[in-house]
Image (spheres, rainbow, N blue to C red):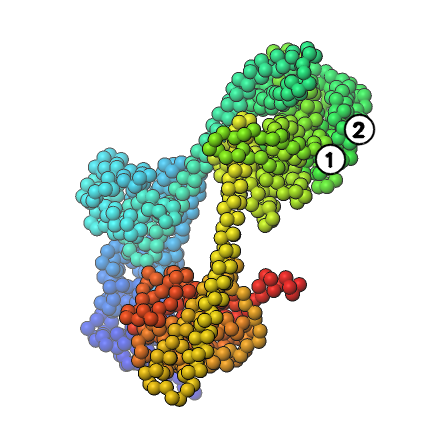
Amino acid sequence: MSQNPPETQAPATAAEVFAGGGQMGALMRSIDWSRTELGPVDTWPAALRTMVGVVLGSRFPMLMWWGEHLVQLYNDGYRLILGDKHPASMGAPGAEVWKEIWSTIGPMAEGVLRGGPATWSEHLLLLMNRKGFFEETYFTFSYSPIPDDAGGRGGVLVTVQETSSQVLGERRLYTLQRMAADSFQARSVEQAARLAMHALDGNPNDLPFALLYLCNAEGRHASRVAARGLREEGLCTLPPVLDLATAQEDWPVHEVLATHQPVQVAPLPQRLLPAIASEGPLVPTRALVLPVEGETGQSPAGFLVVGLSPRLEFDDQYQGFLRLVASHLSTALAHARAYEEQKQRAEALAELDRAKTAFFSNVSHEFRTPLTLMLGPLEDLLATGRLPAEARQTLELVHRNGLRLFKLVNTLLDFSRLEAGRVQSSYQPTDLAVLTAGLASAFDSAMEKAGLRLRVECEPLPEPIWVDREMWEKVVLNLISNAFKFTLEGEIAVRLRWRGDHVELCVSDTGTGIPPEEQSRIFERFHQVRGARGRSHEGSGIGLSLVRELVKLHGGGVRVDSTPGQGSTFTVSIPTGCAHLPRERLEASRPRESTGLGAAPFLDEASSWLASPPAAPVHAPAAPEAPPGRGLAPSGYILLADDNVDMRDYVRRLLETRFTVEAVADGRAALKAVRVRSPDLVLSDVMMPGLDGLGLLRALRADPRTATIPIILLSARAGEEATVEGIQSGADDYLVKPFSARELLARVEGALRLARERAERERLALDRAEFEQHLIGIVSHDLRNPLAAITLTATTLLRGTELGERQRKSLERVFASAERANRMIRDLLDFTKARLGGGLPIHPAPLDVDALCRQVVDELQVAHPARVILLEQRGDGQAHWDGDRMAQVLTNLIGNALHYSPPGTPVQVKAHAEAETVVFEVRNEGVPIPEELLPRLFQPMQRGEKTGDNVSRNVGLGLYIVDHIVRAHGGTIEVRSREGEGTTFRVRLPRTAPLSPAQEGARS
């Protein structure tokens, strides 16, 4: 089979050569190629015609240059690269089309045409003028040779892909990452602003210049805090501070801060131009002002001015990048601001801590002088032995509590010295077993009195241990005292063991234990375990914290192991030898001001926790005659609850000259005593073991039998907040320690007097209510008898046929008036029951709701023959209600609708049964109920006005009684009244009425 020459196989006509090819194929077909350098299409070389078909048939961006002048032809994919150079670029020489970049791409294309190798360029920057300006673009492309018919090179094939968005995206992402990384290190707002703006220096192509202004706290001024891309000497032309109260000629600040949206500025302010660092065609002519957001919901923290590159189109990607810059800047400033605030809070807390330490130190020092002057003479008096028993008892009470106060002052002084680093320790080689055993044995008597066993196991140690004896004394005494406080039965064990490189002191108990969640905080300052069951709730919460700090000064540590309900073990470890101790404090002289008191204060405090046997109630002697005008002095039975033995005995002695007083040690004992005999007043401490004062208060208020007993709380917590908490909890009064005897007696007498006056008022009100109920019963009975006779007589006469029309009408009026009087009496009785008894009694039984509705409507229709009552019923009408009461509801509602609507209008009654409920609606077309009357419509004695009809006026109790009946059935009632719609009462009831408390009791 013969083949034609190649030129006869290629398409010959323009229609054949440019067949298909989309829009560019159509454009090529429309061009008169004879007027171009390529000449008529039918004269084109076969290679050219074939390659054109290949280019047009490809969807990848392709361009071909042909001939010596590189005339270009391209496909639809390449069209977008040309911009506004198209369509003039079709068939034009490449040097003319791409003259702005020909110096870059021309030599590569000509080299391939002249026989050079194919080229490959990746992400090459080309400044193209295809959109009316010199645009920064990036391309990846290849130049390949196209052979001609003679075997040489007739043209160049260009396969190209624009990568501008990829290059710009990577560049912008790097800028944002650098902003975040650099500004993260900032420790102030100003530093964050400078670091963030410095990160922008690496991207002058997107950000030719930038200015950052931050608003002050009041939002009245904005200060320039950072700038980049601008000459320092040129910045003097721009004001460093902007007054936000006035319009700014340079930047649209008000619009940006008000709308939280960026605003473009073009052209740039004239006085900014000298400061711009770039020159020539790179000088920006536009800027974008963006808000720098502050806290959520607040005004912007400032604004950012960025120059727009003259070589980039301001499209969505560019604007989105600039918004992200402002957002990153906002985040950096927020983090720096948060760091500053945290630092300020930390500094404030540290300063507060220093001030507190200094305060404790000063107060402790100041307390020691008067305490010394008080305790010294007291001890001298007690040592004389010539005191009366009552005076000695009082002085011993003062001495015990003075020692307790002295111990607390010394503890605070120790703690302030520890925190201030001013502890003057003196470490001495000590027989630690002998010292520890002696301190522990001091508690023998207290343990025996409490019914506890004390085991002391302090074996002799191989060598003396270097300790500060006064500090070690405080460690041991605090741990044993703490164990005694929270151990109610069993034993306390003190063990000292040699462990080679350290000694170990263990204080174990069989006490109440510490919850696991509290164990990590047990050594914190002022921390006390809430709800812990112990001998007392008193304490400062710094004993165990002081133990930890004192042990640390010995280079040791302390830990706790505890199981709730089984007990706790505190373990102290201190190293042996002295290498770990400061050399200058070894066998150093003891400072003259010592805070050691020995075991006496601890033992006195432990003894005060042991409850003394309850004293028999002391009956008050006859009260003296009261002064005129004040009434009788109050007397009565007072229950006193306080866990502190001294305080309990002191208050009891104050009160027992006027009242009968029973004293108990805690809230649980008080609650038991109240249930045995109800007191006239309860006087309770707030902080007590077991059930505290507030718990006792809540328990008494929750029981109806004790809810009205006056309660006065005693507490050492001073301040308005503590008083408000006590009063809000239901206390009648709140007395803060210390208090005087006169104040206590006055508060108690006042509370008793108010309670008695309140009880008397309640008794009088109850008597009056009973009298009213009795009177209304008598009156209603006396009224009903003659009304029954009138009704019966009128009914009998109306049945006669010999009456004339006028006589019949008169008798009908008499009958209607008697019925109305009966309804009024019934309403008055119901009102009295509802007001005095807390609601209307109902007697639910199975009921046919549909039959009930028909009966009520029929009766009212007979009574109002001239009116139209429309009844609509739907659904299953079975319910469990009080039928008489529900008939009363419907009668009242329909009667009201008839009464307050024009004579010629109908009254609509609907009864719709739903799955669990039944809904009644009664609607009339009367004048709307006044809006001011709606909120009190269901209150007693409320009536709507109906002009010209005084005969049929009611007492205003109907809707009040309806509301009570509906609520007794567990339902709701609502009313809607509008002009043009009339008035609709809507009642929703459960199918089964709930049982009353009395019915529930009878059922159980």
> Which residue: 56% across, 23% down?
416
**Which residue lies under the disc numbered 1?**
488
835 with respect to 691 (left or right):
left
Q: Residue at x 77, y 19 (%)?
A: 434
**Percent x, y of residue 568:** 72, 36
What residue do we see at 40% from left, 39% from top? 337
Type of amino acid at the residue the image marks with label 2 = Arg
Q: What is the three-letter code of the residue carrying label 1?
A: Leu
Q: Nearer the viewer, mark 1 or mark 2?
A: 1
Q: Is residue 221 above or below residue 964?
A: above
- Place residue 581 in its image quadrant: top right
- Whole-percent x and y of residue 637? 62, 37
Few, some or many residues within 10 Å of mark 1 (<14, 14–19, 20+): some
| Quadrant where the C terminus is found in the figure | bottom right
Above-or-below relation of 433 to 517:
above
Q: Quadrant of residue 982?
A: bottom left
Q: Callout 1: helix, strand or loop?
A: loop
Q: Nearer the viewer, residue 992 or 8?
A: 992
Q: Residues within 10 Å of mark 2 (few under 14, many from 20)?
A: some
Q: Could you tell me which quadrant the N terminus lies in?
A: bottom left
Percent position of residue 146, x then y = 35, 68
For residue 76, say whether it is visible. Answer: no
Marked residue nearer the N-terminal end (1 or 2): 2
* Residue occupied by mark 2: 455
**Residue 342 visible in the snapshot:** yes
